[in-house]
Amino acid sequence: MHKHFLSKNKRRTWITILLLAITFDGISQQFNSDNYLTMPKGTGTFCPTSGQRNSTLLMSFALIDRFEFFAQGNLYRDYRDEQSPQYFTTTVYGKYMFWKNKANTGGGGVFLGFGQSPGYYNKTEFTELHKNIWTAVPITIPFLNNMFSWDIMPGAMVDFDYGNNKETAFGFTWSTRLAISKIIPKISIVGELYGTKGEVSSKPEYKVGLRWEPNDFIIPAITYGAGLDGTSGAGFEIGLVIYTPQYLTKDFIKNNTIQY
């Protein structure tokens, strides 16, 4: 898709609308931001995503209360630019939910991982798993009876093998995801801004999209992403989140729902 598929005015309108909106519970899917929530003990999550630039397979396993463990593979290949380099990266990381409110609609968590940090993209750099460390702190703030929710996810990364001189370099990652729910039944309208600043940096980008939530176990989404400066970004992506039953617990067998 051409980088001017959406006019500058339309892009500004989408961003303005979504900055007034805000996010939903669940795994990050093709979004870089995540929320405070860890899945209940005994739940597995699988999330394949395919797009014009990014293709990803994300897997998580909730083996301990308040903890999740993740493994992710990322293929970067821009089908719109034949001259763009392509490469594959991996990342493994853990997440701990250190706080949640009484209604379990907001709270805080922390990530620590090895490999490529969410929100970082540089088409000329290969990010090796064992030479990169990143961390992030997702905070979720709900309001207006949970119709609006806001995810803020500041973070940092260090690359021990950066550039031609193989130096140690640092970067600050920032990401915020916003969405509106309860307007369209079982649909969330989602928007996101993200980027990386510092010695290790990547240009700021945005994503907008829709996420369909027909049940507790299969959740598809479609998004469009581009650079804030009008250049091409992630483009169109489709993704699917699949949650496994909680080891076939009695509550699942009886109610066919995940118990948070």
Image (cartoon, rainbow, N blue to C red):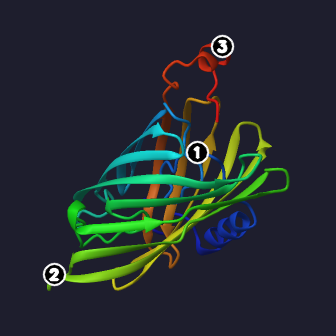
4 with respect to 150 (left or right)? left
Helix or strand or loop: what does disc 2 sit on? Answer: loop
- Label 1: how many Cα within 10 Å (few below 14, some 14–19, many 20+): some
* Residue located 79% across and 50% down the image: 146
Kindly identify the amino acid type of the residue bearing the numbered disc 2.
Lys
* Residue located 85% across and 55% down the image: 144
The residue under label 1 is 26
x and y percentages locating residue 25 in the rendered image:
63, 47
Relative to 198, residue 131 above or below: above
106 with respect to 239 (left or right)? right
Helix or strand or loop: what does disc 1 sit on? Answer: loop
Nearer-N-terminus badge (2/1): 1
The residue under label 3 is 254
x and y percentages locating residue 160 in the rendered image:
23, 76
Disc 2/disc 1 C-alpha distance (Å)? 37 Å
* Residue located 28% across and 70% down the image: 123
Q: Which mark is residue 95?
A: none
Relative to 258, residue 168 above or below: below
* Residue located 22% across and 68% down the image: 131
